[in-house]
Image (spheres, grey):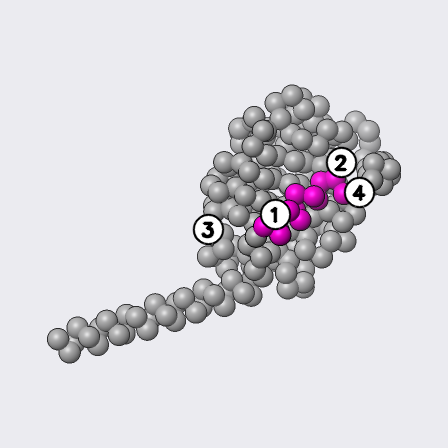
Amino acid sequence: MIFWYNFLSLLIPLTTSEETFEFFKSRCDSKCTLQPYHIDSESISLFPIDCSSVCAYILIDQNSDLTENQLKNYFRNMRTLYGSVKIKDTNFPSLNFLSRLETIECVPVQLIGIINNPNLANATFPKLKKIQSDNKFLMIFQGNHPVLLKDPNFCKSIKKQLNSTEWHAPSVDGKSCEEIEDAQSSNNQIGVLLVVMITMILLVF
């Protein structure tokens, strides 16, 4: 887990300013480009709220002094994001503020990182249809609410949205969807076996 956290902590920004400038320039008008990547009550005023396609690094963390509803209001018209998203060390229970996002095209080597949000039990992106990145991991969930690791349907729904054949995309606490499903299946089998054993013991006595 420490490895993943340190790895993900370095993801923004990894590309050079020149690479980022060229990437943004080729995809967005300057009025739809956000320069500061840390989102807080001061920088959010610069967010291009009227743009459906936005070029930005979006970093939301424990110092982002904004509520879910405030973020949702600013992001309400954003359908396509060119850049990356990193949400870490927050107390948000969901990602509803990104519920209208449909497409994400990542800056080279970037991915989507949802990290160390202990209350985050609902991490779905209901309208997301595509993530494009040259990083094979695409999307990583690490250290969030334990329910995300226990629910294979969550992982499979994200994988379907990613339209990826990579076994590790997405990754939830270092596990692939297949590994999560296998673990759940094993737990179910153990549960059934325990019920059978308890029933047999009760019948004997």
Among the two numbered marks 4 and 3 on one chain, the one whose residue lies closer to the N terminus: 4
Question: Which residue lies under the disc numbered 4?
Answer: 15
Q: Residue 159: say if magenta.
A: no
Among the two numbered marks 1 and 2 on one chain, the one whose residue lies closer to the N terminus: 1
Question: Disc 3 versus disc 2: distance between alpha carbons?
Answer: 32 Å
**Quadrant, the C terminus:** bottom left
Q: Is residue 150 left or right of residue 42?
A: left
Give the residues drawn in magenta, as a range. 2-14
* Residue 50 location (% of width, % of height): 70, 27
Question: Disc 4 versus disc 2: distance between alpha carbons?
Answer: 14 Å
Mark 4 residue element: loop
Mark 3 residue element: loop
* Residue 159 location (% of width, % of height): 61, 57
Question: Which residue lies under the disc numbered 2?
Answer: 55
Mark 1 residue element: helix
Question: Which residue lies under the disc numbered 1?
Answer: 5
Say how many tags the image has: 4
Instruction: Residue 146: give its label.
Output: 3
Q: Name the amino acid, label 4.
A: Thr
Among the two numbered marks 3 and 1 on one chain, the one whose residue lies closer to the N terminus: 1
Among the two numbered marks 4 and 1 on one chain, the one whose residue lies closer to the N terminus: 1
Q: In this view, does 15 lie to the left or right of 187?
A: right
